[in-house]
Image: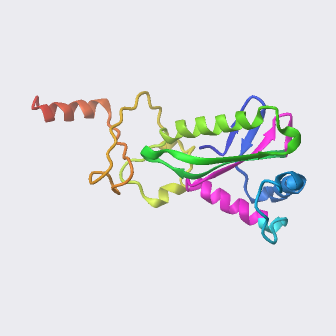
């Protein structure tokens, strides 16, 4: 996942705490519309401090690969948040899944913006899931590494998978992907066949 995507009509951004005022304005503007569909807000929800803390939490959760809340802007009006789309409970590996939620201010519904947004973030997330590779055993600190760091990005031409879940995976529950160069694979294949 990236911090920002663009579609034909929209810009989708992960925001940090510098944008807490804009986010508060969005919720205040949509309060009467969203209120009918959402649970009651906690005390302090409509404050700058609450949204500063929320944006900080959301960014950390995004970097850890646990969730992503994109704030939606029209390209023709890049200073105003018109909606949000969120991927929550992201599960990677062979059970690749997430819960998707979205909301738009009422005057922006019926334009195909929700469809455009969900298609973009779900298509891009799937592709990016298999473009970030680490060598060696995955460690917790790796969640802090940027998904745009060229040291860890590869141009993958083909993927051949064999799900390994159980005693041969690192945690007995998740799929592992092992990547070999063609030369190394050929050498190991010949050794297994006894063609040294």
Question: Horizontal and vertical percent for residue 9?
Answer: 78, 31
| Residue 52 included in the magenta stretch of the image | yes
Q: Quadrant of residue 76?
A: top right
Instruction: Please indicate whether residue 62 sits to the left or right of residue 130 in the image.
Output: right
Question: Horizontal and vertical percent for residue 170?
Answer: 33, 55
Instruction: Please indicate whether residue 15 sits to the left or right of residue 108 in the image.
Output: left
Q: Quadrant of residue 53?
A: bottom right
- At x 81%, y 32%, the residue is 111
Instruction: Please indicate whether residue 184 sits to the left or right of residue 151 in the image.
Output: left
Residue toward you, 42 or 70: 42
Residue toward you, 57 or 122: 122
- At x 78%, y 62%, the residue is 51
Question: Horizontal and vertical percent for residue 135?
Answer: 38, 47
| Residue 195 included in the magenta stretch of the image | no
State the extent of the magenta-drawn residues as a range: 51-80
For the C terminus, the quadrant is top left
Question: Horizontal and vertical percent for residue 59?
Answer: 66, 57
For the N terminus, the quadrant is top right
């Amino acid at each position: 996942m990236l911090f920002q995507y663009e579609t034909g009509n929209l810009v989708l951004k992960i925001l940090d705490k510098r944008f807490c005022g804009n986010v508060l304005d969005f919720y205040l503007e949509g309060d009467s519309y969203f209120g009918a569909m959402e649970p009651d807000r906690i005390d302090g929800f409509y404050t700058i401090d609450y949204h500063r803390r929320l944006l900080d939490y959301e960014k950390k959760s995004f970097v850890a690969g646990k969730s992503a809340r994109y704030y939606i802007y029209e390209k023709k009006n890049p200073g105003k948040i018109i909606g949000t789309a969120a991927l929550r409970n992201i599960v990677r590996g062979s059970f690749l899944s997430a819960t998707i939620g979205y909301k738009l201010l009422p005057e922006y519904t019926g334009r195909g913006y929700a469809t455009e947004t969900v298609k973009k973030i779900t298509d891009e997330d799937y592709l990016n899931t298999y473009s970030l590779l680490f060598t060696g055993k995955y460690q917790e600190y790796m969640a802090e590494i940027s998904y745009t760091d060229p040291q860890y990005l590869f141009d993958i031409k083909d993927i051949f998978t064999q799900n390994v879940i159980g005693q041969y995976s690192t945690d007995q529950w998740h799929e592992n992907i092992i990547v070999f160069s063609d030369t190394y694979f050929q050498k190991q294949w010949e050794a297994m066949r006894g063609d040294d």
